[in-house]
Amino acid sequence: MYLTGLDSAKTTIKSAFGGAHVLSHRQRLVNAVTNGVPSGSAWFDSTIELMTEQNVYGGKLFAPTSAGSSIPAMFTVDKSQYPLFAYEPSLIANGQTIWLRDVVTTSAFANVYSNGQANSSAASRSYGVRPAFCIS
Amino acid sequence: MDWKTLPTNYTDAVWNGLKKYSMINNSDGTVSFDDKTVYTGKENSFFGAAEANAMNAAMNKLAGNMETVEERAASAEASADNAFNYAKNAESSATTATTAKNNASESATAAANSATAAANSATTASQKATAAASSATAAANSASVAQASAAKVTMILFDNAGAHNAIYRGKNLGTSVTSAQWAAIANDTFIDLYIGDYEDVPNRS
């Protein structure tokens, strides 16, 4: 999804708003997974990214969270819910199942199901992307 | 001349046999005949100049009166014609007057109806004016309340990210970002930009 769908979305967004207006900012992204849990990350110059579960729902639902004896690293600075989804939760669903950024297992990522419910699916599935970006 | 009644008791003189005359030899050599016939009713049979004059005078008077009667008749006929004409004119005037009266009556009725309608309209207008005045008063009161509320809301409606991120609007902003919107984003005022607003960019896929 990062290599095909998101790149296509980036092209569309930059065409619509102008590449100079799409804000480049630093983003911490996961770059390693161990036993289905994010184990490594790095800072990147980012322009357009998939949303996290926090961006959509306001919290983690499928991505690993504290399990009593272990506190998995989140490896993200995108920990806040967008006001759009806080004030109008119905817009979480747009009729398409869309990928989120969060790793759920060794082979699954979180997504928003087409009807809006929180979901996770095997990474091999072909779903849409609904990326977020900043304009300036 | 006063009218004198002419006699109507003339009679014919009646005699028996042939008339009888005695011849008288006059000294100048002529003879005269003296009527010796015995008549009956001769006294009223005589028709002389006096009676003829009386009759002629009466006829003349009658003839004169006839002319006067004819003149008066002509005058009376003329007067009758005039009277007839006056009567016709009067009748026409009466008809005109009747028509005018009817028209006046109809006009009066129409005017009365119009007056009634006008009065009703005036009453309705008065009622509407009263209602409008009440509505205006209510609107003024509402405006005052709204103004007071707006003043309170204005105090928290700052043009910055915090305030505009706290309001969902969902407005279609158009097909492209305007220079004013870019400026509002760049200077962090986010004027006329709120949560849920979107650009409907054509041919975006």
Image: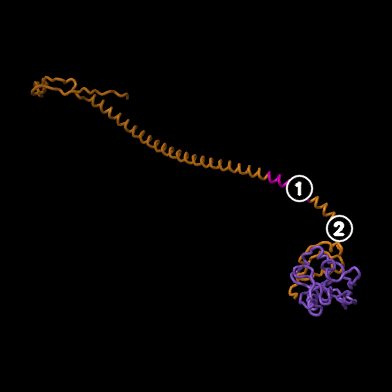
Q: Which subunit holds the residue at mark 1?
A: B
Main secondary structure found in the magenta portion: helix
Residue B138 lies in magenta, yes or no?
Answer: yes
Label 1 SS: helix
Residue B133 lies in magenta, yes or no?
Answer: yes
Judge the density around disc 1: few (<14), some (14-19), many (≥20) Cα neighbours within 10 Å.
few
Q: Which one is earlier in the sequence, the residue at label 1 or at label 2?
A: 1
Q: Quadrant of residue B121?
A: top right
Q: Would residue A21 be visible to someone looking at this image?
A: no
Name the residue: 69% across, 46% down: B128
Q: Which subunit holds the residue at mark 2?
A: B
Q: Would residue B135 be visible to someone looking at this image?
A: yes
Judge the density around disc 2: few (<14), some (14-19), many (≥20) Cα neighbours within 10 Å.
few
Name the residue: 82% across, 68% down: A56
Q: Nearer the viewer, mark 1 or mark 2?
A: 2
Horizontal side, residue B63 vs residue A53: left or right: left
Q: Amino acid at mark 1?
A: Ala
Q: What tint does the image give chain A?
A: purple
Q: Is residue A78 above or below residue B134?
A: below
Q: Quadrant of the N terminus of chain B?
A: top left
Marks 1/2: CA–CA distance: 27 Å
Same chain? Circles 1 and 2: yes
**Magenta stretch bounds:** B126-142
Across and down, in percent, residue A87 comes to 81, 62
Q: Quadrant of the C terminus of chain B?
A: bottom right
Residue that badge 2 annotates: B156
Q: Amino acid at mark 2?
A: Ile
Verify CB contact (< 8 Å) between mark 1 and mark 2: no
Across and down, in percent, residue A78 comes to 87, 70
Horizontal side, residue B143 vs residue B101: left or right: right
The chain in orange: B
Residue B138 is marked as 1
